[in-house]
Image (spheres, rainbow, N blue to C red):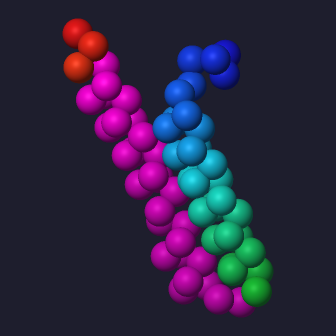
Amino acid sequence: MFKKFTITDKLLFIAAFLSLVFSEILYFKGEATAAIFLGIWVPSILAFGIYLKLLNNKKND
């Protein structure tokens, strides 16, 4: 299953995961505003990855 992922896919997934983890760390340290701001980036990073995947598929067609 993981053979289908490119290095870009893996890096974007890692970036989204790290954003989620750091957001939770900030939240439990009591910095709720910073945690929410950082947590909002998770879906944005994943959406950007989907966009790149669609562009790549369009070039291959």
Compared to residue 23, the image places residue 44 above or below, namely above
* 23 sits left or right of 40 in the view: right
Picture residue at 37% right of the left edge, 46% below the top: 48
* 49 sits left or right of 23 in the view: left
Picture residue at 54% right of the left edge, 86% below the top: 33
* 27 sits left or right of 52 in the view: right
Whole-percent x and y of residue 15? 58, 54
Outermost residue, top side:
61
Compared to residue 7, the image places residue 43 above or below, namely below
* 4 sits left or right of 47 in the view: right
Outermost residue, bottom side:
30
Whole-percent x and y of residue 27? 69, 79
Q: Main secondary structure of the magenta part?
A: helix
The number of numbered discs placed on residues in the rendered structure image is 0
Whole-percent x and y of residue 4? 57, 18
Compared to residue 44, the image places residue 29 above or below, namely below
Q: Quadrant of the C terminus?
A: top left
Whole-percent x and y of residue 57? 31, 19
Compared to residue 52, the image places residue 4 above or below, namely above
| Magenta-drawn segment | 30-57
Picture residue at 66% right of the left edge, 22% below the top: 2
